[in-house]
Amino acid sequence: MEYTKQTLDRSTGELVTVSIGEWKTITEVADTFGIGSRKFRAVLRRLDFLQLEYVGKDWRHRLMPWVTDQGWGKRLRRDQDGRSTPFDVVSPEAQEWIRERLPSALAEMEAEVSPEAAAAVAALDDFRTTRNEYRAKLNDGKEMSVEEMVRWLSDFYPKLSQPEIATALHVTQQLVSRYQDQRSKSLKYALEKRGSEPGPIAAAALRTAFSRSA
């Protein structure tokens, strides 16, 4: 979206509208660089451009104070259908600042992913492709969520640590821990409702879940 400002033309004494460039949301900037939104936000956290803030009932990425203080970003809210959703936009100068630092930050992040985690995510991506194609045929058409990805990796790659999963999925370790705790509770509840001994796969999942929550 193009933003403008009004300034005084001293030669005429009139207010004139001047363009201050194409400001974009974080998601739009991610699209510009051809990077997934979740991964892009992880990069901007690394660059101290974004920070996590607890807004309402969820954590959200918001601009660091120095970005707005420098006039490179605006923290806004969108009111729609009785809901107020926070979002940020950044200036062309900020976009150029990100562009200059993006390659090295991405390289550093890729280097931190262990070979085991990389192999697990490759398998997850194959599964997601098939799963998302199937879901696209349904009415909701929802893609695989981060919580589902954490659960899948925990089921099929139980030796991966929380930091490894967080790094591979470009999320925080706290989020991985929360989803694994929820998974443990779900497995325990399912076992209690079942009222019998679990099969070998379920038993292995339960052992992993309970060892992590201990």
Image (cartoon, rainbow, N blue to C red):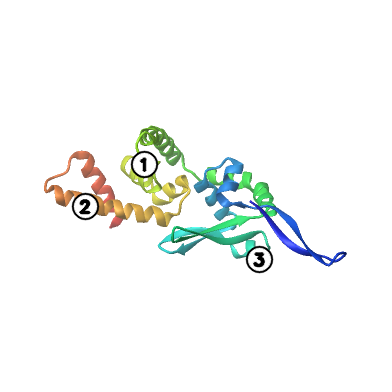
Please state the horizontal and vertical placement of residue 166, each as a whole percent of the image: 44, 50
- On screen, residue 91 above or below 198: below
Is any atom of residue 122 visible in this view?
A: yes
Q: Relative to the observer, which residue lies in front, 146 or 5?
A: 5
Taking the spot 34% from the left edge, 36% from the top edge, the residue there is 138
Disc 1 or disc 3, which is closer to the eye? 1
Please state the horizontal and vertical placement of residue 144, each as a whole percent of the image: 39, 42
Task: Assess whether mark 2 and mark 3 are in contact (beta carbons under 8 angstroms).
Answer: no
* Residue at the right extreme, as displayed: 11
Find residue 193 and name its label.
Answer: none
Residue type at the position of mark 3? Asp
Disc 2 or disc 1, which is closer to the eye? 1
Crowd band around label 3 with a 10 angstrom C-alpha radius: few (<14), some (14–19), many (20+):
few
Please state the horizontal and vertical placement of residue 96, each as a whole percent of the image: 69, 49
Query: If you read the primary sequence from the N terminus, does the residue marked by circle 1 or circle 3 appear first?
Result: 3
Taking the spot 26% from the left edge, 45% from the top edge, the residue there is 205
Taking the spot 57% from the left edge, 43% from the top edge, the residue there is 31
- On screen, residue 8 above or below 46: below
Query: If you read the primary sequence from the N terminus, does the residue marked by circle 2 or circle 1 appear first?
Result: 1
Alpha-carbon distance for marks 3 and 2? 49 Å
Q: Relative to the observer, which residue lies in front, 127 or 88?
A: 88
Taking the spot 63% from the left edge, 44% from the top edge, the residue there is 103
Q: Which residue is mark 2?
A: 188
Q: Which residue is mark 3?
A: 69
Please state the horizontal and vertical placement of residue 23, each as a whole percent of the image: 65, 53
Residue type at the position of mark 1? Asp
